[in-house]
Structure formats: C-alpha cells, structure tokens
Amino acid sequence: MKLTKITDQIICIEEEEYPEHSNCYLIIGSEKCLLVDTGIGLINFNAIKEIFVDKKDLLVLISHFHFDHIGGINQFKKVLGRKINFKEKDLGKKYFDLKNKTIEEFNVDESKVKTVSDEETINLGNLKFKIIFTPGHDNSSICLFEEKEKILISGDTIYDGNLYYDFKDSNKKEYIKSLEKILSLKPKIVLGGHNLPIKTNIQKFIKTKIQELT
C-alpha cells in the first residue's frame, strides 16, 4: 500500500496492487480518528491503527457501497453509512477484475452498518465533518465537508477523472443536484475516491462536470 500525507491530519491510503485503486482517507483528529472507505480489501488496517491511531477511538465511514470502497469492511465491527436496500444494491461488480479474490467477498453484512443522517456532524475534536447526502453516482453516495478548513471528501461523487453514472441505481438528475450542492460549499480542496486531490480552479472544475452531465 501507499501512504500520502495530504495535510498534517489527513493521510491517503492506496492499494497499489489494484490498477483502479480507490483512495481511503485516515483523518487524525485531536479526540477521535476517522477512516473513510476500506478499499478493495488489500489493506491491513490493524497495522494502520497501530501506527497512527494509538489509543483514540476510530470511526469508519463508507462514502458509498461499491466493491472497491467496501472490500475491507469485515476488518471492523461497525461502519457508518447511508441506509439503503442492500438486497437491491448495485455494488458495481461489473468493473471487478482482480485475480485471487472472489465476488462474494464484497457482499455487505447489513448488521455492520450504522445509519447516518444528512447534515449529521462527525466531531473529531479539532475537526468537524458534516455528512452531505449526494446521490447520483449511486443511491448510497455521501460526502464529508469540514467547514472551517473547507475540505471536501467526496468519494466517487466527484474526483479528477471520468464520472460514472451507469449503475442500476445511478440517477443523472440527482447527480447534477448533488454537484450543485457541492459547488455552493466552495471547497478549497477536494479529496476524491480516486486519483489526486483537486486544489486549484475547483469551482470551474465542478461546473465543467455539471456541464458534462447535462
């Protein structure tokens, strides 16, 4: 795995073995820590916890329930996420192409998921992230926004790459509304579910993505 320090308190964790790896983010707050997403399942999060989390509580939040963001979910007793119907959920498995790992490993145990609410706040002490429901990419997508630092953790709702809305539970109209909601926040940095952070010309970038969808 690859670790990249984004800020003094945010570390990006990537699975280099998987070509379309997703970004997992570990946020080290003054009172609690938060892990956003668990990748495809190649990361040993126990090792991560031993190095960075120490004795603080670690919360785990899933930005959306696609296979490349939930693969390590079984390493945790509980995760936070949006309430959805998992029996009808499109986990995005059509993009799965990793050898020596079976499709069945991405099935979600619903009992592990603690439901979050729109505009609920996750308080880590010196950082407070607001949960924002952003459906469109799929029906479980959420973003996190730290208002003081203007940091947006966006999952696959927006990142520096092609946006996907070809899943059974994708919705282009909702996607546009979600991007407009993000635009109104005026983030100073966007940490997406894939690729590098977006740090410059963010408003223009988001507007371009809205135009692509329309």
Image: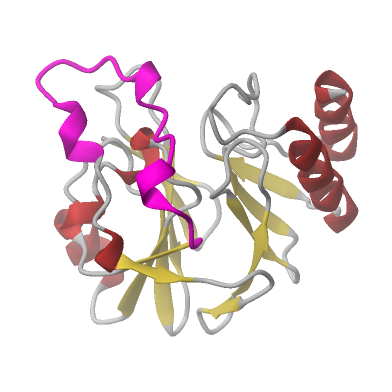
Q: Quadrant of the N terminus?
A: top left
Residue at 89% of width from left, 23% of height from top?
211
Question: In the figure, is residue 55 to the left or right of 81?
Answer: left
Residue 4 pos. (x, y %): 42, 41
Can residue 98 be seen here?
Answer: yes
Residue at 49% of width from left, 57% of height from top?
10
Residue 93 belongs to the span the image colors magenta = yes
Identify the main secondary structure in magenta: loop
Name the quadrant containing residue 133: bottom right
In this view, 112 is above or below 92: below
Name the quadrant containing residue 199: top right
Can residue 41 be seen here?
Answer: no
Q: Quadrant of the C terminus?
A: top right
Q: Residue furthest left?
A: 100
Q: Nearer the viewer, residue 174 or 178?
A: 174
Q: Nearer the viewer, residue 6 or 190?
A: 190
Residue at 32% of width from left, 73% of height from top?
58
Question: In the figure, is residue 209 to the left or right of 198?
Answer: right
Q: Residue furthest front?
A: 88
Q: Which residues are magenta?
A: 82-106
Give the tally of numbered discs.
0
Residue 106 pos. (x, y %): 25, 39
